[in-house]
Amino acid sequence: MTGVTPHTASLRWTSPAMDDGEGMAFEYDLRLAGEPITDQSWQGAIQVPNEPAPLPAGMIQTMIVLGLTPASTVHFALKSRDASGSWSPLSNPRPPCSPRRRT
């Protein structure tokens, strides 16, 4: 997470290499929830629309998530899929973000 406003969160991650340690992901699936996202809670987490297209492995990816509720706690998790349809495990857990109310 690189920044938070009352209604947005700016996310940043390094694009992954796929199974062979090379190549690039085919697509991302970014989810958010009010509680930490685990393998068990993944399906119940809200899918975030408009993820960026994956870049080659090792490049920095960014995304601004819109429509967050001020003063809420939001957890994010990311998976990537390769061209053959195999999904990665969940991304590394990060601390939650809390969009702040403007005073």
Image (cartoon, helix red, strand yellow):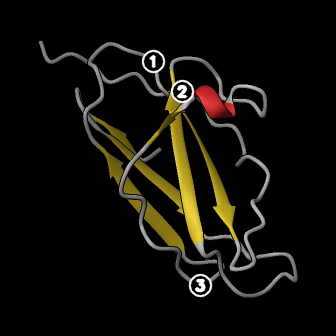
> In this figure, which residue is indicated by the disc labeled 2?
96
> Residue 38, position in %: x, y?
74, 30
Residue at 28% across, 37% down: 8
Say which amino acid is labelled 1.
Thr
> Residue 43, position in %: x, y?
64, 33
Residue at 61% across, 70% down: 15
Say which amino acid is labelled 3.
Pro
Name the mark on residue 1: none
Q: Do the residues bearing badges 1 and 2 touch, measured as CB atoms within 8 Å?
A: yes
> Residue 27, position in %: x, y?
56, 68
Which residue extends farthest right? 20
In the displayed structure, would residue 96 be above or below residue 82?
A: above
**Alpha carbon of mark 3 to alpha carbon of mark 2: how far?**
27 Å
For marks 3 and 2 on the same chain, the one whose residue lies earlier in the sequence: 3
> In this figure, which residue is indicated by the disc labeled 1?
73
Image check: 21 left or right of 30? Answer: right
For marks 1 and 3 on the same chain, the one whose residue lies earlier in the sequence: 3
- In the image, 55 versus 99, the foreground residue is 55
- Secondary structure beneath disc 1? loop
- Secondary structure beneath disc 3? loop
Residue at 26% across, 18% down: 70
Say which amino acid is labelled 2.
Pro
- In the image, 70 versus 54, the foreground residue is 54
Name the mark on residue 56: 3
For label 2, the crowd category at 10 Å Cα-Cα, with few meaning under 14, some 14 to 19 and many 20 or more, is some
For marks 1 and 2 on the same chain, the one whose residue lies earlier in the sequence: 1
> Residue 1, position in %: x, y?
47, 44
- In the image, 21 versus 29, the foreground residue is 29
**Alpha carbon of mark 1 to alpha carbon of mark 3: how far?**
31 Å
- Secondary structure beneath disc 2? loop
- Splitting the image into 4 quarters, where does residue 5 fall? top left
